[in-house]
Amino acid sequence: MSGRPRVLFVDDEPRILDGLRRSLRGRRAEWDMEFATSGALALELLARTPFDVVVSDMRMPGMDGAELLAETSRAHPHAARVVLSGHIEPEAIVEVAMAGHRFLIKPSDAESVTAVIEQLLVHTSASHARAARRLAGAVQSVPVLPGHAEHVAGLRAPDTGLETAVRAATGDIGLAAKLLQLSTSRFFGGRPRNSSVESIVHAMGAPMVQAVAAAGERLAPAGWHPGAGPLLEAAWRHAMATARLVERVASPANRPHAQAAALLQDIGRLVCLAGTDATPATVDLAAGTRDGVPFRDVAVELLHLWGVPAPVVAAVAHRDTPHRPEPAGLGVAGALRTAHLLVEQARSGPAAGDHEQELALLLDHPQLRAQATDWRRAAGEALRQAEPPACAAHSCTVPAGRWETKG
């Protein structure tokens, strides 16, 4: 093997593959490329040697693209998955949404295809690159938290309205993440990349949100790590409180991205504590790692794979990094860091040492001093408003023998 990135293109039309060969000729010195005319042949190639990216059409005889990419997710989770298709039937669109990481519409020029592949060849974790990609790549949908089914229950009604859909999307972390992923493609009624979750719901419509939620439920892992309930509940409450508070902390221009980052800040914990049938997992609760990979590395890798806007990914990546904001503004990362520290202080008491000094510096920023707000009191109110639903968090279980737990 050459050591170069490997990319697999799949389409049942030879002329499409020939066009890709010609248009990507300039990349032959950088990538090893293979071309398959069926899903079955693609799986044979994947079984022989790893690929970094799989780009597949959807409408193919026999095994269609959704089936191919779903199997790729299960058997080859380290491979990033790209949908490149000219048309998808409405009844199949949500299967596609779950199977792919990125979505391109035919005809796409070589520059667009190349740009997406180059993005997906980047691993966000310097020290756990392949392991983080494997854990994140296996994820098709983030399951509803135990005891939180009421957040999405309203979506099951055939006459669900937009208000109910918005409430469900902003109360369920996994659904919010999936909608942000899909919003970048015209397949799903995409919106500009600085849209809020609420505006994405309005653009997609309640039926699409219902379909995405239902598909997510079908693909949800069988259970959760034993004893995960309190950790998951704490993550949910922290996310909801931070999202409420950051709406006031962030500037109007940064508010949509800051709210999204607040909702998704601990998605890595959810992913890593969800059960999986793929491989046994080793979870160290004290260290916050799965198979030796920090939860946050998995979160950032997943959001990168899903094409979530870069400011959101960066804010999640650096939430726990001490922040010194620019005088011109806090930015998305600074707004999230500020809201996070305030909510943490409201939950556990005054921060100690450097965190208290950092928080004082952040609160002294002109962006916050311009508002007549007691920010510590506002954080306490946001935390009280983020009360969890009546839930059976203590009953989170997974089938015996699936997990090996440390800590």
Image: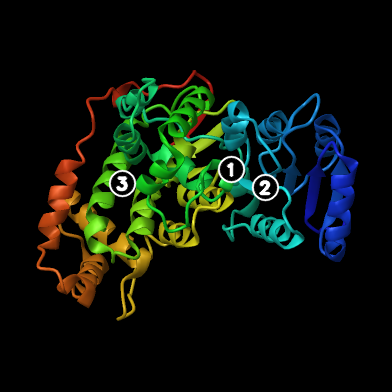
Cα distance in 3D space between marks 2 and 1: 7 Å
- Amino acid at pointer 3: Ala
Q: Quadrant of residue 229?
A: top left
Sequence order check, earlier mark of 2 and 1: 2
Q: Which residue is mark 2?
A: 105
**Which labelled disc corresponds to residue 232?**
none
The residue shown at (59%, 30%) is 90
Cα distance in 3D space between marks 3 and 2: 34 Å
Compared to residue 307, the image places residue 267 above or below, namely: above
Compared to residue 124, the image places residue 37 above or below, namely: above
Query: Residue 39: x percent and y percent?
Result: 80, 32
**Which labelled disc corresponds to residue 239?**
3
Task: Give the position of the C terminus as an image quadrant.
Answer: top left
Of residues 186 and 228, which is closer to you in this image? 186
Name the element at disc 3: helix
Compared to residue 225, the image places residue 106 above or below, namely: below
